[in-house]
Image: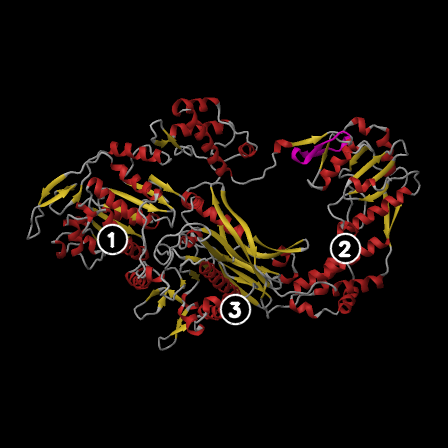
Amino acid sequence: MMKLHFEDDLDYQKAAIDSVVNLFKGQEISRSEFTVTFQADSSPNFSLGMEESQLGIGNRLLLVDEEIEENLRRTQLTNGLRPSEKLASGDFTVEMETGTGKTYVYLRTIFELNKNYGFTKFVIVVPSVAIKEGTYKTLQITQEHFEGLYPKAKGYEYFLYNSSKLGQVRNFATSSNIQIMVTTVGAINKKDVNNLYKENENTGGEKPIDLVRATNPIIIVDEPQSVDGGLTGKGKEALTAMNPLCTLRYSATHIDKHHMAFRLDAVDAYERGLVKQIEVASLQIDSGNNKPYIRLESTSNKKGSITAKVEIDVQRGKNIKREFLTVEDGDDLEQITNRAIYENMQIGTITCASKNKKGGNESIEVKGDGFDQTLNVGEAIGGVDPDEIKRLMIRRTIKEHFDKELTFAANKQPIKVLSLFFIDSVEHYRQYDENGNIVLGKYAKMFEEEYRKLAKSADYQSLFKEIDLDTDASEVHNGYFSIDKKGKSVETAENNQAGRDNAERAYSLIMKEKEKLLSFDTKLKFIFSHSALKEGWDNPNVFQICTLRDMGSERERRQTLGRGLRLCVDQSGMRLRGNEINTLTVIATENYEKFAENLQKEIEQDTGIRFGIVEEHQFADIRVVSESGEPHALGFEQSKKVWQFLKDENFVDAKGKVQDTLRAALKDGTFELPEEIKQELIETHGEAQAGIVASDIQGVLRKLAGKLDIKNADDRKIIRTREAVLESDEFKALWERIKYKTTYRVEFDNLKLINDCAEAIRSCPPITKTRAQFRKADIAIGKGGVTADETSASGFTSIHENDIELPDIITDLQDKTQLTRKSIVQILRDSRRLQDFTRNPQQFMDYCSEAINRTKRLALVDGIRYTQIGEEHYYAQELFQQEELKGYLKNTLETNKSVYTHVVYDSAGVEKTFAEDLEKNEKVKVYAKLPAWFKVPTPLGTYNPDWAVVVEDEGEEKLYFVVETKGSTWWDDLRHLEGAKIKCGEKHFEEIAKETENPAKYIKSTDVDGMMGYVD
């Protein structure tokens, strides 16, 4: 059978263990002999570090508070943590990111504390049956490993506290070996009903709690945020009742920090490759706007104003966007969305959660013609069928799973791949008929259908050579839920004994067979769970996590990810490293940018990591090597001086938030520490070390500053005119030729327009049904924040919707095209594509309005006639001085021949190059990049030409040009709005050229060489 291999030399784990052990530096191993009075066969025991007591053998602390306080500060400075001002309690915190071996660390800490100081009594308190089972499992599979590392501790004992087996508590108190008791907080925090607080003959007539108290146990709390129930909660009270020597708290997400002794946070773990890298495959729905969609996100009651936040489809210009809006009772949905599809629909009663209860009864009422529906949080109407989406997600998870199996097989890596599904309700996976037989729920059916389909595809033939797919599909998946006494699955609630018993049976199935699950001999690869696998269960070989329920609560993403963050193991139980193997794929409906943003928020709330914030102690743990080769930390005082310098220079604000000035200084390489800090570093550590420290400080700041391409507000400036050019004869002559204003009228043939519109609709692309697509992105967690980088997009999958009500297409097109109803009816008939309207009404209407408006543009441009208004209507040359031109320095080019001192360009490509070449070309005398106020009217909106240029060719007559530059030659494509405007511009300049001698020519060119082609 496969055995997990434990590594005993990981530097970060050793640092976490040493951080706790060093708290008791100076404690001696004290020896004492004593007897235990109530044992009949009392015999003298030799013991180390144990105090004589009538009730048993206890841990004994010889240090005073001041000594522990000193040790704590030294440990904190070594680890770059803010030093505690004073010892407020015996609580010490170790923060370790999920998946980095927290359980291993606290178990090994027990043996180190015993070896160094002789402590023997330890109680591990956990929040749930799941974590209790997980801890017990770890104690079993590490026994051989720890006895090898600590031969003197052989014979140590561990047990799960059970209120019906109190003899174990007596043994805990009297044994001289290491004793480890594991209990859930639920089993110890209720005094009135709990056997722990009652006298019992199995403990010699004592109250079991008194025996535990007398031993002064060291309490280890796993996931204290779930155990305590707050600083004054029942859980915290029960811990204090045990009279602990100290309490060590281990978690990735501490709510109450207490005295922090060690920290390995999400960012450190990710950057050091101690956990899997994360990627998200997010399901996006395209063209699904054919039904009146509305989903409730949350409700709110602030100062008596009751509102709801809903997700809804809103018309913004030409596009429909799914957005979050705040609504209140009585709101008309057609008005707030600008969409006729929501006609007669309005918001009814909004119900908020009561202050004491989070979630629960939040709802809104949505009313419409003939219906009245109540939506709870997360529920929607008018969306794509949720089951269709769930099926696509299950299919994608199986595909990702198979792809990983193929890759590992091709690289000859014997790694078992597991996938985990979180579902919204147990009955969707497993149901029972009247006789109590298991029946597949809808998710299980979908899974088996999709599994067989994919397994038969050519891509995965190599994985299924000699496998019977019918039996295989049913054997590779299972659900782990609480199993009640009859063996039926129920949802987990651990707030009562029956609930705890149910949980116990389900977890023992999955917890006690961890190695079995990792072995190729076990067929099970796909695990469905409700809540059983939240905290406490994880498996190193989970490579896919699919959430078939909304990621709701604030800690949900991290808790969910935590199930799959551990680095994987192969068939010999050896841990494997490297991102090419260790990538966790999350399949979700949330788009990946949102996922990254929400994950960042959760990490900030959970861990207190503040992305982009420099703390006073930020640089304290930078390593410095002394002349004797001893490494030590830079320390808090020195770190504080660097922080003060950053604040004084406005590189960070008073809260330590990184400012754009620091980003700019780091980007252009001008960041320097001040002389006095440099000097102090040289005097303390020598020149070479000082240089290393300075570059380490920059490295830390770079990570915190994050990736931001910034435009510096200080760079924005007002661009002045160059008087010599503006007042020159050349420029005046140029301006005289282009300054006049025109007006236009349009003539076109109505019948031809209708025929052309129908033809344009006929040649539109095919109409697609509502489609779904997965977009995949890598999630990177760095000190500057959580970022998402798209890596791939899948093809589209059609979704069949049979319940679409057809909207009023005539009115819709009338509003969008301003044509008469009669013309629109004629166009639609002649297009011969009306059957497409039923496939996807919204997409068809969008295509039609676009095609009609495009054809109208062509007709307008074709029939436009410009007329010069008269000599007195023109753009005055003085406007160059009166109208301000602004630009960012990084988007400007200093010039000599231009009307302005700088040319402001939009595109670093064409415009910048064109200006540079105008400056270089000797034949170009003066020019202007025409300002935004120089406009030509067109029926499609105003048009602003690009350049006006004067060219003189060796004493020949001067030539005047108005030049349109673009990066490609699409300007002849009149279907393009900009192309149609350019065509109108051409006709405008033709008109004002009529009465002029040597008029300005209107030309289109991508570069100056092209323009000069008109000169020769």
| Pointer 1 with pointer 2, Cβ within 8 A | no
Q: Which residue is mark 1?
A: 144
Q: Which residue is mark 2?
A: 975
- Name the spot of residue 770 as percent of width and height, x first: 61, 64
- Magenta stretch: residue 885 in it? yes
Q: CA distance from mark 3 to mark 2?
A: 44 Å
Highlighted magenta segment, given as a residue range? 881-896
Q: Is residue 939 visible?
A: yes
Q: Label 2: how many residues lie within 10 Å, few (<14), some (14-19) or many (20+)? A: some
- The amino acid type found where label 1 is placed reads Glu
Where's the C terminus, which quadrant? top right
Q: Which residue is mark 3?
A: 457
- The amino acid type found where label 2 is placed reads Arg
Q: Nearer the viewer, mark 3 or mark 2?
A: 3
Under tag 3, what secondary structure? loop
- Magenta stretch: residue 207 in it? no
